[in-house]
Amino acid sequence: MASTIEKKEHSQVVISLEASKEEFDAALKVSYQKNKNRFQVPGFRKGKVPYALVCQYYGEGVLYEDAINEIANKQYPEAIKEHDLKVVSRPTMDVTGIDDTGVKYTIEVSVKPEFELGQYEGVEVPFADSTVADGDVDAELDRMLKRNSSLEEVTDRAAQDGDTVTIDYEGFKDGVAFEGGKGEGYNLKLGSHSFIPGFEEQVVGHNVDDDFAIEVTFPEDYHAEDLKGAKATFNVKLHTIKTEVIPALDDEFAKDVSEFDTLAELKADIRGKQEARCEENNKSGFENEVIRVVCDNCEIDIPDCMIENEVSQMADDQAMRMQQQGIGLDMYLQYVGQSMDDFKKSLEPMARVRVKSSLVVEKINEIVKPEVTAEDYEAEIAAIAKSYSMDAEEVKKSVGEDSEFLKNSISARKTVEYLASKAVKVEPKPAEDSKEEEKK
């Protein structure tokens, strides 16, 4: 098989291929076998029309497409291997000639771009060493207290801000009830601002079994067109008032919510976990900045298809995350008034950053060649198992005992860690200086 390549702009490559008359004739016979049940000629049952008669009755060209595909399916992978091409797009084929010598055709593809690295070792990168403050521990304790709070019904006072009330309500515009304005047994936390502005404030001060009217004005940007900026009256019946009871922050609370016997031990555990997260965030944040600086030091002409593929992957990931929360991406975009095309366009800048980062790390990885040990592999399996609450052996069965993908992932991470270890940490610039640079 003879093949040549022509490198074009924007990482496009045209592969020229050809097949002899004998090869083409053999492919035509394969195409005939594949399609013979499509042909009908008077006097012959379907699928029984001889090859020569098909060519005479329909014309040999009816077999060309599948014949050429048959040839290309064998030659194209061989050409990719021969010229060591890293293809990143679907191939497009163009037949340039069919004659007595055989068939000639070209296949055009996008390949990973060739580029020169800039400085990647010893780059200067701002590093902010954030730490855990006492207030961070207190804030987590406050969240734990609220998660473990309870609602206690009160009957000896009026509703206050922060209470949860149970109400019936019905809304009227110009004396006529409007769609979606009625609810029964609705639990509303006063001060949550989950209702129309002014509604919750007018419930405050009322007692259990009170019947009362509330006057409100709908916001100009309200989702229902006929209610935008409209005045409305809600008739309200208040059934119950409940107040949030927060447990005491003491040793008993620590015993109830954790495996610790004292509040001091719980605080120490919280601080330890926060410090570990803080250290990991500092590390990953610095590594991300290192990659950003290294990427800024080189120019890459990235094929559009690589950006498009990354955008599609990001959109699919977002759809999956939202689906896990019970929300469809299409429904969400409809709610916020954004088309799928606009949503994908908004992902392009980040997709470009991710693709460039991946290309740069991959190229440096080929130079650094970090070793991936059996211990590294086992640690990665253990981390995946922990993340998905699975047994390590289950993970191994799923990904394999010697997954090339997993080893490449570990190798890439080691390359990033190598770059971070070679980088020079410098003090972050003051906020004002950063703003001035952005203006430039």
Image: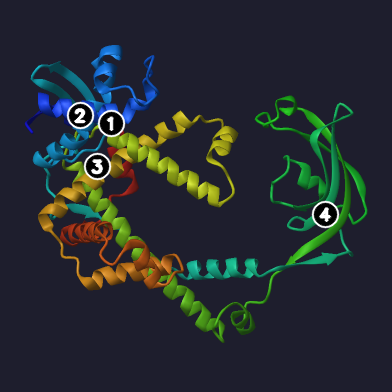
In primary-sequence order, the first of circles 3 and 2 is 2
Disc 2 to disc 4, how far (Cα)? 77 Å
Local secondary structure at mark 4: strand
- Which mark's residue is nearer the viewer, 2 or 1? 2
Q: Nearer the viewer, residue 76 or 205?
A: 76
Q: Identify the residue at horizontal 12%, vertical 57% (top origin).
A: 368
Please name the amino acid that badge 2 sits on: Ala
Marks 3 & 2, CB-CB < 8 Å contact: no
Judging by the rendered image, the residue that carries numbered circle 2 is 27
Please name the amino acid that badge 4 sits on: Thr
Q: Identify the residue at horizontal 25%, vertical 47% (top origin).
A: 358
Q: Which mark is residue 191?
A: none
Please name the amino acid that badge 1 sits on: Asp
Q: Residue furthest bottom?
A: 261
Please name the amino acid that badge 3 sits on: Lys
In primary-sequence order, the first of circles 2 and 1 is 2
In primary-sequence order, the first of circles 3 and 1 is 1
Local secondary structure at mark 2: helix
Disc 2 to disc 1, how far (Cα)? 34 Å
Judging by the rendered image, the residue that carries numbered circle 3 is 356
- Which mark's residue is nearer the viewer, 4 or 1? 1
Marks 2 & 1, CB-CB < 8 Å contact: no
